[in-house]
Image: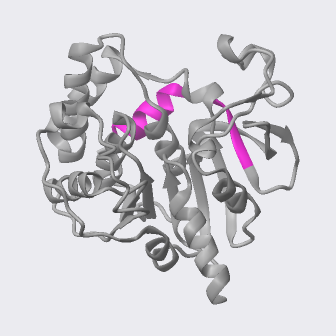
Amino acid sequence: MKQGERIPVVWDMETGDPDDFLTLLLLAGHPRVQLKAVTITPGTPEQVGLVRRALEWLELELPVGAHNLDHGKPCVSAWHYRAYGEAPPSREAEPGGELLLAQCDEQTTLITGAPLKNLGAAIALGEARGEPFRLGRLFAQGGFAGEGVVPPHLQLAKFRGLAEVPTYNLNGAPKAALAALACPGIAGRWFVSKNVCHGVVYDAAMHARVEAVKDCSPSLALVWKGMDAYLRKRPAGKKFHDPLAACCALDPEIATWAEVELYRKRGKWGSRLQPGSGTRIIVEHDHERFVRVLTEV
């Protein structure tokens, strides 16, 4: 990609904790990103209303997709409303699989911080219609690389010596995750796994870095606002899983990657080294480079 050219991105999210909504705000205003669409899991009217309000704040008119508008529960954490105020529910959303099938192509990056239900639906729709799903790059928060892939000195203490662990996003839709791993239309797959992202925390120091540039970016001003509310209640900080995955998509050199086969075993996920697989998983990251990409204006 040429210098200054924006990356076409689709963001697939949930709203069970702050990470995904903060990533939406980040991507919607980042100078490297052309945000094409947003899909939501499960995609309740409360979630759709929240996403549409955020897009309105940043003056974006984008298609929004939902996996299941009739899920029955709001699926929005209390933090969202406490930090940003109430949002009216909305049913203005397309089926998420249909939207991904229409919006994704060989030039597009799909970043996901949710169970892969919308992606699984898009792959299945493409197969049924004889219109294979195509995607340039998939960056997913989830999966696990540990013993046999990550050197011992880079393993977080709580994962030391482990080869497989449960991982929420992939276990939220395991058939869809396996379909994505097998899909020939996805040119490259990158997974930002627990062993690294559990060590990345938005704390007072990062808050100060965002504060220093927030007046230059409506997007980062909104991120700062949400995290200011969060830190007042939890001053130790917040694990920043999904923003790390998003920033790795914008600058893959933030991370060191291993080419692997991802596998599922008794409800847990692991990785084994497999050169040539086209599937990469994060082994370590350059924290300063990550923060620079996060705060770019």
Placement of 269 over or under 58, stated as above or below: above
Q: Quadrant of the C terminus?
A: top left
Q: Which residue shows up at 52% across the image and 42% down it? A: 245
| Spot occupied by residue 74 in the image (x, y as percentages of width and height) | 29, 46
The coloring applied to the image is one colour
Residue 296 located left or right of residue 102: left
Which residue is rendered at x = 43% and y = 39% of the image?
A: 243
140 left or right, relative to 174: left
Residue 187 position by quadrant: bottom right
**Residue 7 is inside the magenta segment:** no
Magenta-highlighted residues: 280-296
Residue shown at 66%/39% (left/top)? 143
Residue 286 in picture, x, y percent from top left: 57, 29
Rendered position, 136 above or below 287: below
Q: Nearer the viewer, residue 19 or 30?
A: 19
Where does residue 277 sit, x and y in percent of width and height?
83, 55
> Residue at position x 32%, y 47% from top?
73
Q: Residue furthest bottom?
A: 130
